[in-house]
Image (cartoon, helix red, strand yellow):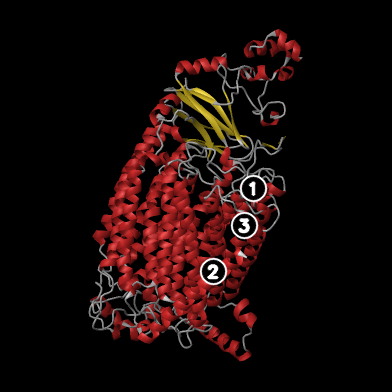
Amino acid sequence: MFEVIIVIGVLLLLFILYTLFRIGSLVNVVKGTDKKVVSMSNRVNGALMMIVMIAGLGFMFWYSWVYFDKYTLPVASIHGELTDKLFWVTTAITGVVFVITNILLFWFGYKYQHKEGHRATFYPDNVKLELMWTIVPSIVLVVLGYYGLQAWHDITGKASDDAEVIEVMGYQFAWAVRYPGIKDNQLGDYNYKLIDDKNGNLFGIDVTDENSYDDFTPLEMHLPVNKEVLLIIRARDVLHSVFMPHQRVKMDAVPGMPTHFKFTATKTTQELRDEIGNPDFDYFITCAEICGRAHFSMKLKVVVDTQEDYDKWKSEQQPWLKLNPDYLKDIPAEKRELAKIKAGIEDTELDASL
Amino acid sequence: MATADIHITEETHHDGHEHDHDHGSNFWTTYIFSTDHKMIAKQFLITGIFWALLGGTLSVIFRLQLGFPEAELGWLRPFLGDWITSQGKIDPEFYLALVTMHGTIMVFFVLTAGLSGTFSNFLIPLQIGARDMASGFMNMLSYWFFFVSSIIMLTSLFIETGPASGGWVIYPPLSALPQAISGSGLGMTMWLVSMALFIISTLLGGINYITTIINLRTKGMSFSKLPLTIWGFFFTAIVGLLSFPVLFSAVLLLIFDRSFGTSFYLSDIYINGEALPNQGGSPILFQHLFWFLGHPEVYIVILPAFGITSEIISTNSRKPIFGYKAMVGSLLFISLLSFVVWAHHMFVTGMNPFLGSVFMILTLIIAVPSAVKVFNYLTTLWKGNIRFTPAMLFSMGLVSFFISGGITGIFLGSAAIDIQLHDTYFVVAHFHLVMGSASFFGMVAGVYHWYPKMFGRMMDAKLGYIHFWLSFIGIYLVFFPMHYIGIAGYPRRYYSFTNFDALNSFTDLNMLVSIAAILTLSAQFIFIFNFFHSMWRGRRAPANPWESNTLEWTTPINPGHGNWPGEIPTVYRWPYDYSKPGAEKDFIPQHIPFSETLESNFEQENELIKLEGTDSKAIVIDGK
């Protein structure tokens, strides 16, 4: 019943609107205004140009000013400070252009609206003017491009040799991280054909490579503050993209082609919690490349520690091999002893598993 | 030589015209399998309007999810069936399907086929003074390939596994593996087949546009006298002709990967508990191929809109377009650059950073011709005598959108800044303003402006004004807030933000965007009503309702097959002689010889009078 009333109401409203429209057009025919090239509407539109422009710009400045802290994320990495600076410099320069050109557009619309008996100025070209507005933007862009290139060069440059290497792998629909381990500080080899979710080998870790024995795969990512970190990024099913909004880090994870991103975090989790006054805050990695059904929920907690806390946390982690001792039997016999030592596996545990 | 050719074409076409009438053209040859460019244009337009409404509706459905994540949407079940979950929510995979189909439909079916298909077809012969397209048959084929492609794409919306849902860019491996998302099953196959047919349609159309513009211009219509609309269509067709085949190859290789076990794009994949045998392929290869079309595509979408608005702004400002040569030059420059900037979509794909630097520089250069266009539009308005027809309002709206959206391109084109902004709502805001809304406005402006020529009647101006203001304000309310959401780091194509504490503070803004989107879509129904109502009940159009200079207004009010009943008018002057000092009226159409406008001629134009009366061949040569 309720639906029927709504339908009738809508039909009635449409009918009334249509009748108003018909009356309007008939009145125009009677008055003869429909034959005029320019009617009263021209003035109304001209006035609306100014009103809408002023209201629009007003809203923009109001929101940009009042809600500044809401839409800007705190920055927590060295290169992030640089790209943020570039962003705001670009905003300032282009913002001026944006405001001026939009004002001119609507103001010209208002000011030069049709006037009876008036004639437009025949003004087909002006080479000097055109050269000016070709050259000036070019110069501005060269400057922006120069600083942009420098930043890009620094960000994508080679990581330092003592950078903390961490592997992060995207899969539907989560992130997994792997650390090279304390004993050798080298990530072990992997092969996608060795991936076996049921038996805990998410990464396809190749246990014939001795570097893998002390690798550990925690459930959250920890980073040291003020130390360069090199993320080795890969995916094992479809494209994903590592996005750490606060660290201004983004790099796609591509199956079959490892990518990397180096950065230095500048604020520990605790420092940022204090800064924004939110004791529950945590950094995170999220996915920025469409990857399927649960794309929106690919989240990994990231903890930025002081160097001491970080080292302590690392030393507490159990190597992957120790947590998955079944894989010991895949290790060539001559390397098993080494594996046991590197993974910290006691003989008693070994007996139990073999 | 050229003159002789044109003459022969005229004769044959004229004969064909008579022939049609003698035997009576039936419904099928007039309205369905028509080879008349004007009818084909209308077919493209009506199909485009249908697609625009569908694409807009899809966007409103996913905006409901984003703006009102808590809302109970069970009432949509009669339309969407099981895509609404038992909790009354949109299924997350269907959300992705909506996003994907919205993008595909809007970019290809509305703003490529609907825009170029309509206006290139309609205006090229009318504005250059030709009887029809170079090949009417190919033109008809172009529409029917598009039609079949549309049917397939539309059908894919109704299949059980759902339409393609890997984003409109269909990046593999997601689009290649049905295990990864259900839309990559039959839906993706249909997407690929549909796009392959679509590309054939575009190429058939494009070849026709280019040939017609080069070969069938009337006497005196040299390239330097072409209206900017034609320049826009010309460059668009060339860009399309060179870039669409690359998408075709990308699509073909993806079909191979999906159906025939090749590994062009696939490597090292473990999914659903099994490792796939594919090795050695590269998903990045697909991105290169895709964006080699994908980037020119955004210019394919915007260049015709530029052409249309240049014409409309000049006509309604009653002023010549400022810097005609610079306008053509910037169109050309943009077209050229459009081929060498594609990888700015890929800064963070792991592509070599040096390549990133090169593409960054090339991308920033595009801002220069774009800025020139904006400044030239502004100067055209300056000291004009502006008539706000609905077409004029929409054209000015285009300029505003192009400024607002173009400026953010400088951020995204700068690789270092793009790291943070890539794939966030900032990008969504950017391209929806600069190419989506801007070219949509160009298209609507074109409909309002050339409606009298298409249907012989006028659209209602007041409804047009309401349509404009609601759309203009609505679109800004939809896309401007997205900049803030993007700066705050919100990634696009997210079904919901509830999982992210730090990213969960824009419920108010998202709600505003959704409400504005619904209003904007509703406003389009005013246009739909106006469009169809005016077809039968609109005021009869005068011959030249906007007092415009171009040739199409010299045809009868309802031009028949062949456009001009008699001889095609000869062209003597450029199309922008508005408000010429000394002239009696504030416009002098292109077919008026200088000998008739002695009072307003410039010195060099008086020189040209000598050539007018004599051998017309001389004028053709002069033009070349």
Please rate how many residues cluster around mark 2, counting C-alpha atoms within 10 Å: few if below 14, some from 14 to 19, many from 20.
few
Amino acid type at mark 3 = Leu
* Contact (Cβ within 8 Å) of mark 1 with mark 3: no
Residue at the location (30% across, 72% down)? A43
Q: How many marks?
A: 3
Q: Could you say whether the residue bearing mark 3 is in a helix, strand or loop? A: helix
Q: Do the residues marked 2 and 3 share a common chain?
A: no
Which of the numbered marks, if any, corresponds to residue A10? 2
Amino acid type at mark 1 = Gln
Q: Chain of mark 1?
A: B
Amino acid type at mark 2 = Val
Residue at the location (29% across, 85% down)? B595
In-image side of B478 versus A126 (left or right)? right
Please report whichever mark, 1 or 3, sits nearer to the chain's N-terminal start.
3
Q: Do the residues marked 1 and 2 share a common chain?
A: no
Residue at the location (59% across, 69% down)? B143
- Asked if residue A31 is positioned above or below residue B399 in the image, the reply reads below
Residue at the location (49% across, 84% down)? B558
Q: Nearer the viewer, residue B321 or A57?
A: A57
- Asked if residue B536 is positioned above or below residue A11 in the image, the reply reads below
Q: Nearer the viewer, residue A30 or B366?
A: A30
Which residue is tagged 3? B76
Q: CA distance from mark 2 to mark 3?
A: 18 Å
Residue B374 in the image: x percent, y percent?
A: 34, 59
Residue B144 in the image: x percent, y percent?
A: 62, 69
